[in-house]
Image: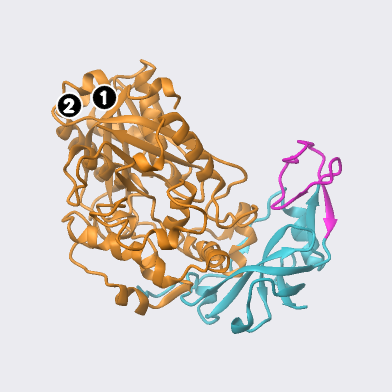
Amino acid sequence: MSRALRGKAAIVGIGATGFSAYSGRSERRLAVEAVLAALQDAGLGPDDIDGIVNSDFDDTNQVDVVNALGLRGIRSFATIPHGGGSPCGAVAHAAMMVASGVCECVVGYRSLNERSGHRYGSADAVPAFPWVYGLHAPYGLIVPGEWTALHVRRRMIEFGDTREQWATVPVTFRANANRNPCAMLHGKTLTREDYLAAPILAEPLCRYDYCLETDGAVAWLVTSAERARSLAATPAYIHTAVQATGFPVWYQSNWYRESLTTGAEVVAAAGRLWKESGLSPRDIDVAQIYDHFAPLVLTSLEDYGFCGKGEAASFVGDGRIGLGGDLPLNTAGGLLSEGYIHGWNLVQEGVRQIRGTSTSQVKDVQFSLVTSCWGAPTSALILSR
Amino acid sequence: MTQPLPNLPRPLPRIDREHAEWWAALRRHELLVQECPRCKALTFPPEPACPRCRSLERGWRRSSGRGRVLSWVVVHRPSHPWFADKVPYAVVLVQMEEGFRVIGHIDVPIEKLRDGLPVEAGFEDVNDEVALIRFRGA
């Protein structure tokens, strides 16, 4: 997104299903429920929608959403690739569709029965492992946590990071989830002692370092800034939205490139984000940092420039990332504790912070940052009032 | 968290054209790295063009097999049934002398693993097409 698009579009509706371990209904149904909820939130109807976007890895074909809701006026559609790297990129594409004048109102959705249906990394997913997966899966590195552990070990070697330090991330996010009735882990507390006593799965990672697996869906609506001002909800203006691949990049198995502790794709996205927004990390009031794995939040904070390389483990201490701190993070609980809608629920919370409706609301939010996945072609989004 | 894992065969690579020669060499107990015949850049994992000079001509260079441990993971809870009776097991990332990196198993006790540990590649035959890398202390 170039500077010329700044503030031309806004997120005007957000909708979601409940987040659970068993939805009891189809992913198609979840997607449609979320879209209807977003329409109701915005005070718009299906006939207002003329563009549609979603993420890859989504088994709900756009055709199913069109047919279920009778969307008769779709004139542009796109699916944004790279899984958890895609959510902010989907917003960027919707903004481009609107700012170009091709569309007036674009719906985006992400739906998955990730817990009760097919689970990412489950052993029955592939009989033989293609692409670069074939170079590590035969050794027993099958799931993303086992790949991520290699990166986290390097943080421990290079920076001296400890589990005691990065425990702050899951413990803080859980406290946020405890205030959010929609969070899967709303009713379950997590103390530092709980964290340190948890069994190790792929050393050095324990279960609380892993994101959740969730059944649910999230949808949003993007329209022009002009139209947004006439709608019910406070518009969350798309100040800046960027995508970047960096080079080289794979999917969470980025140990062939020079550094295991710096994300080429995130550094590239961050460079564009700050340049095109005219902002710096100090201008961000609240951030939703993609938290597929707790220690990767540290690497992301460094790569986005919130602190120097190797400094994040101490940066997150002293309450800085909690509610009331300098940089409150993942205020709905994040992917670790609210739910894992592949990063789309982080966008939803970024909008709530602009509206003033978060259950862990930060005061006087002017700029709300949302990021997508570290370790795959990625994207980032700054929303503004 | 724990649930019964289905009975599945050992995970194997699905070998594509870019990786065919690399796997064939491993089965001969040779470790290769892709080398650009034009600019001599080493590329791993292999690519259909040289990311430095963009040549479509591709070639290979034999590695000394010597390297140093750069990182490792110790898996305690198996995510694949074939590894259920093998936990805890270590998997290492090794920086080879030539500068490229590979994943392998290692015949060094878990408690002896450390950054920079010198290792040498050995090979474990799995079937007629596949051998895996098994490092030992050097």
Q: Which residue is drawn at 61% across and 62% down?
A: A136
Chain letter belonging to callout 1: A
Q: N-terminal of the two: label 2 or label 1?
A: 2
* SS under mark 1: loop
Q: Can you tell which chain is drawn orange?
A: A
Q: Quick one: A320 or A43, which is closer to the camera?
A: A320
Same chain for the residues at labels 2 and 1, yes or no? yes
Q: Name the residue under label 2.
A: A44
**Tag 2 and tag 1, C-beta contact below 8 Å:** yes
B38 in the magenta segment: yes
Disc 2 crowd rating (10 Å Cα; few below 14, some 14-19, many 20+) is some
Name the image quarter holding residue A110.
top left
Residue A269 placement, left or right of B56: left
Q: Can you tell which chain is drawn cyan?
A: B
Residue type, label 2? Leu
Name the image quarter holding residue A59.
top left
Say how the picture is coloured: by chain
Which residues fall within the magenta stretch? B36-62
